Amino acid sequence: SLDGRLQVSHRKGLPHVIYCRLWRWPDLHSHHELRAMELCEFAFNMKKDEVCVNPYHYQRVETP
C-alpha cells in the first residue's frame, strides 16, 4: 500500500511487525512492543526507504 503497510487476511500491518508475529511472537500487538537491535542498518525506526523485516533483528520490550 502507499503507506508501507502489508495486508494479510483483510488486516493491514507494518511489515516488520507481521514477520515478528509470524516467526517469533504470535501475541505481539504493535510496533511499540519492538526495539531494533543496534546491528540492523534498516530498522523501522530509522525511517529509511527500505525496512528490515528480519524478526531476529528486533527485540521485544514490555509495555507498561
Image: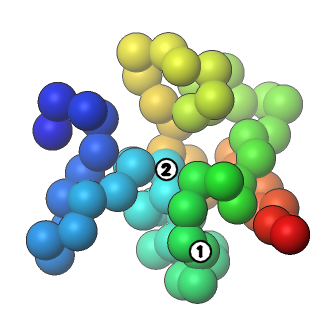
Q: Residue at x 16, y 75 (%)?
A: 9
* Residue 34 placement (x, y as % from top left): 70, 54
In the picture as drawn, the residue positioned furthest to the top comes out as: 48
Q: Position of residue 53 (x, y in %)?
A: 49, 45
Is residue 9 left or right of 40 when viewed as pictured? left
Give the class, few, some or many, for how many residues have Cα within 10 Å of label 2's Cα (few <14, many ≥20).
Answer: many
> Which residue shows up at 54% across the image and 83% down it?
26
What amino acid is at disc 1? Answer: Leu
Q: Name the quarter where the C terminus is drawn.
A: bottom right
Relative height, residue 54 to residue 27 (above, below): above
For this rendering, which residue is in front, 45 or 54? 45
Residue furthest bottom in the image: 27
Q: Which residue is mark 1?
A: 28
Nearer the observer, disc 1 or disc 2?
Answer: 1
Q: Can residue 34 be seen from the camera position used here?
A: yes
**Residue holding disc 2:** 16
Secondary element at image label 2: helix
Q: Residue 48: where, in percent of width, then height?
A: 50, 15
Q: Quadrant of residue 13?
A: bottom left
Q: Residue at x 29, y 35 (%)?
A: 4
Q: What's the residue at 53%, 19% (across, down)? A: 47
- First-in-chain label (1 vs 2): 2
Q: Is residue 44 above or below residue 27?
A: above
Outermost residue, front direction? Answer: 64
Q: Position of residue 59 (x, y in %)?
A: 78, 56
